[in-house]
Image (cartoon, helix red, strand yellow):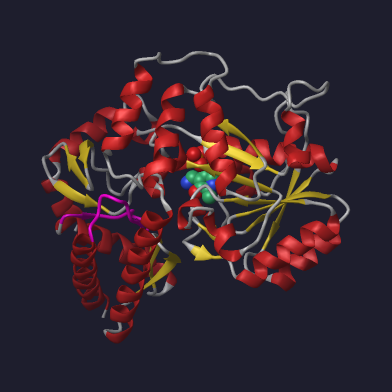
Amino acid sequence: AERSYASKNPKSAQAYGQATDHLPGGSTRSSIFVHPFPLFIEKGEGGELTDVDGHVYMDFVSDFTSGIYGKTHPLIRSAIISALDNGLQLGAHSTSESHLASLLCARFPSIDLIRFANSGTEANILAITAALRHTGKRKVVVFEDGYHGSVLSHFELSGSNWGGTHDMKVPFDYLVCPYNDIAGSDRVIQAHSDEIGAILVEPMLGAGGCIPGDIDFLQYLRTKATDIGAALIFDEVQTARLSTGGRQKTLDIVPDMTTLGKFFGGGFAFGAFGGNRSIMQMFDARSSGAISHGGTFNNSPLTMAAGAVAVEKILTEEALADLNQLGDWMRDSLNEAFESKSLPFKMTGLGSINQVHCTLSKDSRTTGLSLLFHKLLGRGYWIAQRGLISLSFAMTRKDVEGFVNAVIGCAEEVGKLAR
Ligand code: PMP
């Protein structure tokens, strides 16, 4: 598969060689690397991507969930153009900023007050900072296979201490607990209950493989956080698209803080963190000792305008429900086929956020997934090499049906090779 991939994609191979002259790994995003070399995409339109060799793929990665609108959207396009007429950057307070804030606060009951940032990573760092300042404690509970952003993940993986930034003056330690394991988590949390200021959790593990958090487990965290005087932070950077109020709304669990990102910037760099008034008030510049939180592009007029039109006109209750139903149908259909045909794959996920896993022996899993990925490319479908499959509004039910058939066909071919 790799040999024919190289011969089919000479321009991507060449572009990759050139990119590595100046970028380690050929890009500034480790997560998009593909073995043996990545395809270079020249253009996106609707639900499709065109690479430098002229191949067209239907995009089932959707930029790891942030590309929910497809590559273009007429409403976002016109909102950006109108905003552009009023200036690229204003460096000042603006009503477009408070408008987007009001829309997001209305959607998430857990968010009385909100602040913006430029990435989900930043949002999580700031949420942790606020929670620890508020509680006066220094330990943060995170979970195995959790992902809260590039910077934070290095510290999680090593399980080491992090001094925070000098500006924030909040030294903190991570405690890593097992996800979806109440007894295992409780042992760790109980042993450190006096020192824990924050519990940071994804309601569904995203980069960790689209593993939904059990309701009992998330409710346990809610109760436990209150019992020990810690702030419960839901990282809904990905899962916010599961309903108008994220996964917290569907589960009826109200965390103390919520972090958001990705699509709420209407396609631009974005992050947001918010929560109950008593915590978020610490950022109020009118009070002495307020936490300083700056960021040149935090309230970029283009981002504010694109985000607002997306929330008001595109991410409606009905549109999100339809997209998530389509995702549920896709996952169920694939799982039924994998099971009835005894194919070595399994789907997990919720709604429009999904992951295909290879169920071969541990040593063969990466190869199995990579083969599936390459075979799907051969049929014109693009998924993440690690198996993430995320839907966008640019897809019709027919597109998804075609994709399901292609995945089954490719999985059968991989299954034969594995036998
Ligand atoms: N939290 C979660 C759950 C994420 O999936 C991601 C990004 N994939 C982040 C945080 C980090 O967001 P960003 O890439 O915008 O920094």
Q: Nearer the viewer, residue 236 or 365?
A: 236
Residue 29 horizontal/vertical position (percent) = 41, 37
Q: Residue at x 75, y 33 (%)?
A: 281
Instruction: Name the dominant secondary structure of the magenta segment.
Output: loop
Q: Is residue 162 visible?
A: no
Q: Nearer the viewer, residue 307 or 269?
A: 307
Q: Nearer the viewer, residue 163 or 264?
A: 264
Residue 332 horizontal/vertical position (percent) = 35, 75
Q: Residue at x 20, y 55 (%)?
A: 377
Q: Residue at x 22, y 44 (%)?
A: 46
In the displayed structure, would residue 118 be above or below residue 277?
above
In the displayed structure, would residue 351 be above or below residue 297?
below
- The image quadrant of residue 290 is top right
Relative placement, left or right, of 304 versus 170 is: left
Q: Nearer the viewer, residue 199 or 106?
A: 106
Q: Residue furthest bottom?
A: 340
Residue 407 horizontal/vertical position (percent) = 24, 67
In the displayed structure, would residue 306 be above or below residue 199?
above
| Quarter containing the N terminus | bottom left
Q: Which residues are magenta?
A: 380-396
Residue 393 horizontal/vertical position (percent) = 30, 51
Relative placement, left or right, of 51 versus 389 is: left
Q: Is residue 279 visible?
A: yes
| Quarter containing the C terminus | bottom left
Does the magenta-highlighted stretch encompass residue 390?
yes
Number of numbered discs overlaid on the protein picture: 0
- The image quadrant of residue 347 is bottom left
- The image quadrant of residue 37 is top left
Does the magenta-highlighted stretch encompass residue 99?
no
Q: Residue at x 53, y 36 (%)?
A: 271
